[in-house]
């Protein structure tokens, strides 16, 4: 029984989504869960696989080979979600190779893994498109067809060599031919001795003919569970005869769907459903009792023994699932994947470089006539340095901000199957951002620096570039921390400007340190913008002199760099201090992002084990 609470206040009510279901699936068989939309197919599949999101109550008993599901259950099962969650910038073969590398232990050997991948490619009919990019998702790449993407998704899960494969609507969004191909591939998978359970909405008759067993749901209740070939006969005996040459799936769905068009039709169809559910419950329980009294019934919830082809088998149900590889190997594999992704995102890489080059060119143009000898010229230099610090701070944060949100679907799936640890993923993902950061900021610095009147020494230029690169990497870490905390991409985009404005306010440019309320004085120490501006200003003004005073000041008047740094609140500071601040902040933000990411692991609802009230339902033959 699965129920959730819906509504608020007085309208709060308990909604029962699954009620009194029972059945079993056996190795070598394809069990299809069929029913109209909203009948509870996905909920049932999630409940069986232990993947129902938290919130609500789930009661019942799910056993595998006679044992209750334990922590080891995950390692013998695989779950293919309705949406294909794959990285679009990898080819089909690369996607499968990565899955084999990360999900199978190193002891299997690279050659054996490659052979296994080739076998899966052959088996799922992906040979023609093996070296085509998957495409879709957040990329602009067209990629493989929907059916091929679905089969790649199935292949990824198959590579963990599961005994039990759950698939939610593996044919949704596919044309009849592609759907047939996918279902045939699943039948072949079942033929290897695995148990395959899938939900399906409205299969054509040739697909229906592939099912071994059928579980028919309507409004969360069981209307039929048994041999798919026997379903039409069962309903015919109850007076609902499938017309000749009619697709049995269409007939069954018409029979068990509620007609919401009119009050009378809704009441009539609901009554028919209630009667069918009642009839099935009575018949199945009689059959179970008979089987029990004959001693022929299967033991409580038992499925036939697992085949030797599957990993783990039924044993190990209590063993905590372990990662297939050590953290080092995970890191290399994840770094390799992240590098491929980053290097293939041509449009994004070019756009980012152009963006920095254009901003740098505009700054260079506007500030090209500034000179320390012009009255107030130093103010132009301060503005330019502040603009550089803000540009880098914003750009880095925004660039990395939505990264985890975009990848979350894939990483959640991978983490749910315990494919790898968070640490190696985080390290690989962030390291890949480093070269981009260096290239972008060197380009930015080279265009801006020499075209304006900034400190014209080679050392000062190098330090300028180092400060912006460090600031950029710190901003990236902050962006990653935010994207690890927020629930989704849109929220991340709403939060980012707020954070930037907040940090800008305390950077030392808009409000002098003395004017900031004491209770908020600490904020600048968590601002990469503050350290960025500090580093750039100290690097530019230290040891320089001969700046003309602003217009209106008593003339003749000259300022030196120390006076300007004092005005900014950076007197006595050094570039080293700024570097130290940025490095500490970078470390802090990275630790924060890592911890948040770790805590954000997908959480599923536990099953309250209830004693089965009757013998488990035996499939009608
Ligand atoms: N967490 C939840 N809170 C409220 N209602 C829920 C929740 N989960 C599922 N439901 C409701 O339970 C019913 C069954 O949902 P489920 O997604 O299992 O149906 P389905 O048979 O998979 O439908 P479809 O064919 O459209 O995918 C639906 O009416 C859905 O709105
Ligand atoms: Mg569904």
Image (cartoon, rainbow, N blue to C red):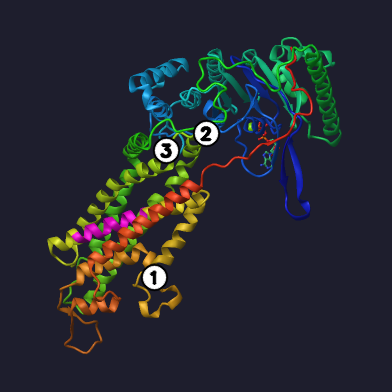
Q: Name the residue rendered at 45%, 41% in the picture.
A: 407
Magenta includes 582? no
Q: Name the residue rendered at 22%, 75% in the picture.
A: 377
Q: Are the residues at dot 2 and dot 3 in contact (C-beta closer than 8 Å)?
A: no
Which residue, given by chain and number where applicable, does mark 2 sit on?
A: 320
Which residue, given by chain and number where applicable, does mark 1 sit on?
A: 506
Q: Are the residues at dot 1 and dot 3 in contact (C-beta closer than 8 Å)?
A: no
Q: Is residue 481 above or below residue 103?
A: below
Magenta includes 464? yes
Identify the element where label 1 is drawn. Answer: loop
- The residues bearing labels 1 and 2 have C-alpha atoms spaced at a distance of 48 Å
- Residue that extends furthest to the bottom in the rendered view of this protein: 554
Q: Is residue 450 visible?
A: no
Part of the protein shown in magenta:
463-476
Identify the element where label 2 is drawn. Answer: loop
Q: Is residue 5 above or below residue 99?
A: below
Residue 282 point in image, percent of width and height: 84, 22
Q: Name the residue rendered at 24%, 82% in the picture.
A: 550
**Front-lying residue, 348 or 324:** 324
Q: Nearer the viewer, mark 1 or mark 2?
A: 2
Q: Earlier in the sequence, mark 1 or mark 2?
A: 2
Q: Is residue 489 visible?
A: yes
Q: Nearer the viewer, mark 2 or mark 3?
A: 2
Identify the element where label 3 is drawn. Answer: loop
**Front-lying residue, 60 or 295:** 295
Q: Is residue 507 above or below residue 336?
A: below
Which residue, given by chain and number where applicable, does mark 3 sit on?
A: 139
Q: Earlier in the sequence, mark 2 or mark 3?
A: 3
What quarter of the picture does the N terminus occupy? top right
Q: Earlier in the sequence, mark 1 or mark 3?
A: 3
**Rendering quadrant holding ligand 1:** top right
């Amino acid at each position: 029984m699965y129920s959730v609470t819906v509504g608020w206040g007085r309208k709060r009510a308990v909604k029962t989504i699954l009620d009194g279901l029972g059945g079993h699936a056996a190795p070598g068989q394809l069990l299809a869960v069929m029913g109209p939309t909203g009948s509870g197919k996905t909920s049932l599949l999630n409940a069986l696989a232990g993947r129902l999101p938290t919130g609500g109550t789930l009661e019942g008993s799910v056993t595998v080979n006679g044992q209750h599901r334990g922590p080891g259950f995950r390692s013998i099962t695989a779950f293919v979600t309705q949406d294909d969650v794959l990285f679009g910038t990898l080819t089909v073969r690369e996607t499968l190779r990565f899955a084999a590398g990360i999900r199978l232990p190193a002891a299997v050997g690279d050659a054996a893994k490659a052979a296994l991948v080739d076998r899966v490619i052959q088996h799922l009919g992906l040979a023609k498109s093996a070296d085509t990019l998957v495409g879709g998702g957040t990329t602009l790449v067209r990629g493989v067809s929907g059916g091929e993407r679905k089969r790649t998704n199935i292949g990824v899960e198959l590579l963990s060599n599961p005994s039990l494969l759950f698939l939610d609507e593996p044919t949704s969004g596919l044309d009849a031919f592609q759907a047939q191909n996918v279902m045939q591939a699943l039948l072949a998978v079942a033929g290897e001795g695995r148990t395959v359970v899938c939900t399906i909405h409205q299969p054509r008759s040739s697909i229906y003919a592939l099912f071994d067993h059928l579980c028919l749901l309507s409004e969360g209740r069981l209307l039929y569970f048994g041999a798919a070939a026997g379903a039409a006969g069962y309903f015919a005996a109850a007076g609902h005869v499938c017309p000749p040459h009619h697709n049995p799936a269409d007939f069954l769905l018409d029979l068990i769907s509620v007609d919401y068009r009119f009050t009378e039709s809704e009441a009539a169809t609901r009554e028919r459903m209630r009667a069918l559910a009642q009839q099935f419950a009575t018949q199945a329980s009689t059959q179970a009792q008979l089987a029990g009294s004959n001693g022929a019934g299967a033991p409580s919830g038992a499925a036939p023994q697992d085949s030797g082809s599957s990993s783990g088998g039924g044993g190990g149900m209590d063993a905590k699932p372990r990662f297939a590889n050590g953290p080092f190997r995970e890191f290399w594999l994840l770094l390799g994947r992240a590098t491929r992704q980053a290097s293939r995102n041509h449009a994004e890489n070019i756009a980012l470089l152009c963006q920095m080059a254009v901003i740098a060119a505009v700054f260079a143009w506007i500030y090209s006539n500034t000179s320390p000898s012009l009255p107030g010229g130093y103010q132009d230099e301060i503005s330019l340095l502040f603009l550089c610090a803000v540009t880098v701070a914003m750009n880095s944060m925004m660039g990395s901000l939505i990264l985890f949100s975009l990848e979350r679907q894939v990483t959640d799936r991978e983490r749910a199957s315990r494919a790898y640890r968070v640490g190696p993923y985080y390290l690989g993902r962030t390291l890949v951002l480093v070269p981009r950061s260096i290239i972008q900021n060197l380009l930015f610095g080279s265009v801006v620096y020499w075209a304006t009147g900034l400190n014209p020494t080679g050392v000062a230029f190098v330090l300028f570039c180092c400060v912006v690169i460090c600031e950029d990497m710190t901003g990236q870490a902050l962006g990653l921390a935010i994207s690890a905390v927020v629930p989704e991409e849109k929220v991340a985009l709403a939060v980012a400007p707020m954070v930037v404005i907040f940090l800008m306010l305390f950077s030392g440019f808009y409000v002098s340190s003395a004017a900031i309320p004491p209770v908020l004085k600490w904020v600048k120490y968590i601002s990469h913008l503050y350290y960025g501006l500090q580093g750039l200003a100290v690097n530019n003004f230290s040891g320089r002199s001969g700046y003309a005073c602003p217009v209106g000041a008593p003339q003749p008047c000259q300022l030196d760099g120390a006076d300007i740094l004092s005005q900014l609140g950076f007197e006595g500071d050094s570039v080293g201090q700024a570097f130290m601040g940025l490095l500490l902040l970078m470390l802090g933000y990275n630790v924060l992002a890592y911890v948040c990411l770790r805590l954000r692991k997908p959480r599923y609802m536990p099953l309250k084990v209830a004693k089965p009230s009757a013998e488990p339902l035996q499939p009608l033959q």
